[in-house]
Image (tube, rainbow, N blue to C red):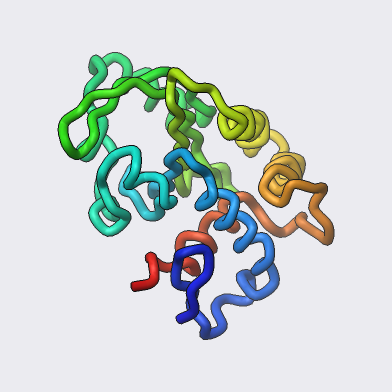
């Protein structure tokens, strides 16, 4: 294992996909982990499989405590039932990005308001493989929030135009137009490699 961006990365060769897309996977990890605001990835059942460093500062929960848990059982669950039904209908049934203001509660029990951006990540068959969520201080809009806001159109276009969605996604992550072929690479594949190839914080 070697340490990179505060995380441990497997040194042994992984799937051929990762070897081919390694720069993009690492760019994705660096972009997400470098955000000052929390970012999480869950599986299709909403169990957390990856978090960035900022999650601890905002919620009080470490990566180790968060992995395998549902965000609702850790810091969510403070809004009316109808709010969560609306959110799940948007991201799971309509497969679209959900953006709204929400009250959460940190590990110490303190409640706070923030904006959330939750988006499904679709596989090649249009099925949900992951959800990715970003959280922002409701009182202080930032450049990061504008960055994530620009992700919304790319993620919303996954089903209708996967290739264009991927290029838009990569241009934001890599901060320039993607080079090389991206036709056989989907957003879900990149996220999959991030989750399975980038490990937990090095001790």
Going by the image, does 96 lie left or right of 166? left
Position of residue 189 relative to residue 46, above or below, is: below
Q: Who is closer to the viewer here, 47 or 23? A: 23
Residue 156 visible (yes or no): no
Assign the N terminus to one quadrant of the image.
Answer: bottom left
Going by the image, does 5 lie left or right of 92? right
Position of residue 174 relative to residue 139, above or below, is: below
Q: Name the image quarter holding residue 193.
A: bottom right
Q: Who is closer to the viewer here, 111 or 20? A: 111
Residue visible at 24% across and 15% down in the picture: 80
- The percent position of residue 49, horizontal first and vertical second, equals 37, 54
Going by the image, does 126 lie left or right of 90? right
Residue 169 visible (yes or no): yes
Position of residue 133 relative to residue 183, above or below, is: above
Residue visible at 34% across and 20% down in the picture: 113
- The percent position of residue 194, horizontal first and vertical second, equals 52, 60
- The percent position of residue 199, horizontal first and vertical second, equals 42, 68
Return the residue found at the far bottom. Answer: 12
Q: Who is closer to the viewer here, 74 or 141? A: 141
Q: Who is closer to the viewer here, 44 or 116? A: 116
Assign the C terminus to one quadrant of the image.
Answer: bottom left
- The percent position of residue 73, horizontal first and vertical second, equals 20, 38
Return the residue found at the far left. Answer: 109
Residue visible at 51% across and 31% down in the picture: 95
């Amino acid at each position: 294992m070697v340490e990179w961006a505060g995380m441990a990365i497997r040194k042994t060769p992984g799937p051929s996909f990762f070897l081919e897309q390694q720069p993009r996977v690492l760019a994705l990890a660096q972009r997400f982990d470098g955000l000052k605001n929390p970012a999480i990835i869950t599986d299709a059942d909403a169990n957390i499989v990856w978090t960035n460093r900022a999650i601890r500062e905002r919620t009080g929960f470490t990566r180790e405590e968060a992995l395998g848990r549902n965000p609702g059982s850790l810091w969510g669950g403070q809004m009316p039932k109808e709010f969560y039904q609306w959110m799940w209908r948007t991201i799971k049934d309509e497969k679209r990005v959900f953006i709204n203001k929400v009250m959460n509660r940190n590990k110490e029990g303190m409640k706070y308001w923030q904006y959330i951006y939750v988006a499904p990540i679709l596989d090649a068959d249009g099925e949900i493989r992951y959800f990715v969520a970003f959280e922002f201080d409701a009182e202080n809009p930032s450049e990061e929030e504008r960055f994530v806001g620009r992700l919304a159109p790319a993620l919303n276009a996954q089903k209708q135009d996967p290739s264009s969605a991927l290029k838009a996604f990569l241009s934001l992550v890599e901060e320039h137009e993607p080079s090389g072929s991206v036709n056989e690479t989907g957003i879900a594949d990149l996220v999959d490699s991030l989750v399975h190839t980038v490990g937990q914080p090095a001790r």
